[in-house]
């Protein structure tokens, strides 16, 4: 079925959503609605901007209104774990939920970010994290998924930087429980050296979100051609980090690639069908062109 064939909204139309703050930039509705149309599934995907203090009410609303499921994005992924009726083992281990499935009134939390990150990384770096020294900026739900993925992928060493160092230390402690061979925290003064010494650099913060933000947590003057740079942020145009990495000949992955990879698994969990990956990818790649 062509993705241009829109199904009429009816009383039987299933509801899906992304919940975050902010969500005005989100490409998830465009991507998921393209996939639903392509496969002829009677459902619609919406976006809701929800403040942290209102997350519990919003999650209860998913159950009360019979939503098929939802995505949870910044800054709610960790808080959402306490609001589920049950957690998939990976979501429980990572301590972050990005996908909710409504199973007859019971909300089950999943984490598809780990798989999404690894698939995006392998797309530009076939060896993945095997034997690599990795620097991760951030310590929230997205960063936890990245660190879990790096450990599963065989990273040699993981270095974590976060504006609040106590959160970075907590993430490294969790990484040790997950089987990390080495995880250390770096302070801002040593961030440049840590970036220079790493093989894989990951921005798992929201810095760079929006076209007005021309900043990078990871110092761009440290970038070299041997680096693999992954920026989980996406927007209408590449972030400063991605632009700088491309200019220096580094392999890069922007947030759109991971967005599609994790979304494809969310889609499968909701619908029971393999996601039309290329339809989803092309829908977001056209944005900003």
Image: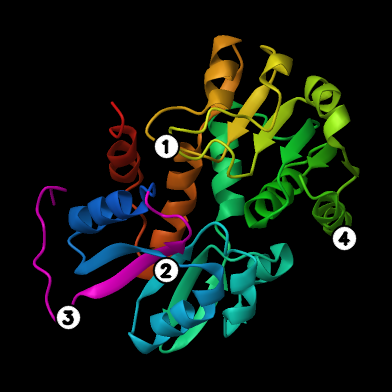
The answer for how far apart the CA atoms under marks 2 and 3 are is: 18 Å
Would you say 256 lies left or right of 94 here? left
Mark earlier in primary sequence (1, 3):
3
Task: Name the dominant secondary structure of the magenta segment.
Answer: loop
**Residue 282 at least partly seen:** yes
The answer for how far apart the CA atoms under marks 2 and 1 are is: 21 Å
Q: Which mark is residue 70?
A: 2
Q: Nearer the viewer, residue 58 or 32?
A: 58
Q: Residues within 10 Å of mark 1 (few under 14, many from 20)?
A: some
Residue 207 is situated, as x and y percent measured from the top left of the image, at: 59, 39
Q: Quadrant of residue 74?
A: bottom right
Residue 231 is situated, as x and y percent measured from the top left of the image, at: 58, 35
Q: Read off the residue under disc 3.
A: 12
Q: Is residue 63 above or below residue 211?
A: below
Residue 187 is situated, as x and y percent measured from the top left of the image, at: 87, 37
Task: Identify the residue at image location x=24%, y=65%.
Answer: 44
**Residue sitting at the far front:** 212
The answer for how far apart the CA atoms under marks 4 and 1 are is: 34 Å
The answer for how far apart the CA atoms under marks 4 and 3 are is: 45 Å
The answer for how far apart the CA atoms under marks 1 and 3 are is: 33 Å
Tell me the magenta residue range: 1-24
Q: Secondary structure at mark 4?
A: helix
Q: Read off the residue under disc 4.
A: 177
Q: Secondary structure at mark 2?
A: strand
Q: Read off the residue under disc 1.
A: 235
Viewer-nearest of discs 2 and 1: 1
């Amino acid at each position: 079925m062509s993705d241009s064939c829109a199904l009429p909204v009816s009383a039987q139309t299933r509801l899906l959503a992304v919940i975050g703050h902010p969500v005005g930039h989100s490409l998830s509705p465009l991507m998921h609605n393209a996939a639903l149309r392509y496969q002829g599934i009677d459902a619609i995907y919406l976006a809701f901007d929800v403040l942290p203090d209102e997350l519990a009410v919003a999650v209860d609303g998913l159950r009360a209104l019979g939503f098929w499921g939802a995505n949870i994005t910044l800054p709610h992924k960790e808080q959402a774990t306490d609001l589920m009726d049950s957690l998939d083992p990976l979501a429980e281990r990572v301590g972050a939920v990005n996908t909710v499935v409504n199973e007859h009134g019971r909300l089950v939390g999943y984490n598809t970010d780990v798989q999404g990150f690894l698939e995006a990384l392998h797309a530009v770096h076939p060896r993945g994290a095997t034997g690599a020294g990795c620097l991760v900026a951030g310590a929230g739900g997205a960063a936890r998924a990245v660190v879990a993925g790096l450990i599963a992928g065989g990273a040699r060493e993981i270095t974590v930087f976060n504006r609040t160092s106590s959160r970075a230390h907590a993430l490294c402690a969790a990484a040790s429980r997950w089987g990390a061979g080495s995880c250390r925290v770096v302070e801002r003064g040593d961030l440049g050296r840590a970036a220079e010494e790493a093989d894989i650099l990951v921005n798992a913060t929201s810095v760079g979100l929006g076209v007005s933000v021309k900043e990078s947590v990871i110092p761009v003057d440290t970038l070299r051609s041997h680096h693999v740079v992954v920026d989980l942020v996406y927007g209408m145009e590449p972030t400063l980090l991605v632009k700088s990495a491309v200019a220096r000949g580094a392999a890069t992955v922007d947030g759109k690639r991971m967005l599609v990879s994790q979304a494809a698994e969310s889609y499968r969990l909701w619908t029971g069908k393999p996601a039309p990956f290329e339809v989803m990818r092309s829908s977001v790649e056209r944005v900003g062109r």
